Amino acid sequence: MSTELLDRLFAFHGHRCWASTAGVRVAQAALDALGVPASGGKSLHAVVDIGDHHGAMCFADGVQVTTACTFGKGNITKSGKGKLALTLVDTASDRRVQVAYKPTLQPQIRDSAFMRKRGAGIPASEIPEAEQWELVNLVWDAPAADVLTVGPVEPAGWQPIAEVIRFAVCPGCGQLVAEPYLRVANGEQMCVDCAGYLA
Ligand SMILES: [Zn+2]
Ligand SMILES: [Zn+2]
């Protein structure tokens, strides 16, 4: 695997960490299993199993950089299970594969200088670079069998979701708003903020 990918990851992610590195390895294995390039564009959809407000959510940034499935394209979603696994769907061929991070290295990771400092509340970006690289290299250089559990490639049963392209200008605030998000207030179609309700 190219270290160019790691360079791009850390430029995007903002610090060097084992969880985002694990995300790259898991995502690369999923692309390889499906035999599709990262530039699958709209034909790829990623479901990451991270939740909210827990450690190692950085995993998802490794997945985004590697697969090019991004929040802005709307082709990445979270299952909210609090786990470091990825289901990657190739919607063009309607196939999917699940790849999970295998925690063989967790005792070493848990006892590392990096994780002891993270546990003490020190932000990853303030931990010495050498201690950041120690864990990145551990995950990056590990044999695939030590860090990856690759499931079978299966039919995905993918249901495409139509995208509404149309926009309107809200008469209240003058901002652009996607049509499905217009709400009626005082007889006018307005944005959620100006209408005062979302649902
Ligand atoms: Zn991170
Ligand atoms: Zn408005």
Image: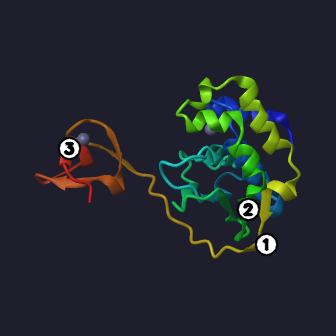
Q: Is residue 63 above or below residue 96?
A: above
Q: Position of residue 186 (x, y in %)?
A: 10, 52
Separation of disc 3 and disc 2 at Cα? Answer: 44 Å
**SS class, disc 1:** loop
Q: Specify the amino acid type for callout 3.
A: Cys
Q: Specify the amino acid type for callout 2.
A: Val
Q: Would you say the residues marked 1 and 2 are in contact, meaning their CB atoms lie under 8 Å apart?
A: no
Separation of disc 1 and disc 3 at Cα? Answer: 49 Å
1 or 3: tag closer to the N-terminus: 1
Q: Specify the amino acid type for callout 1.
A: Pro
Judge the density around disc 3: few (<14), some (14-19), many (≥20) Cα neighbours within 10 Å. Answer: some
3 or 2: tag closer to the N-terminus: 2
Q: Is residue 65 visible?
A: no
Q: Which of marks 3 and 2 is in front?
A: 2
The dot on residue 25 is: none
State the residue position of label 2. 99
Q: What residue lies at 73% left-to-right and 50% top-to-bottom?
A: 107
State the residue position of label 1. 152
State the residue position of label 3. 194
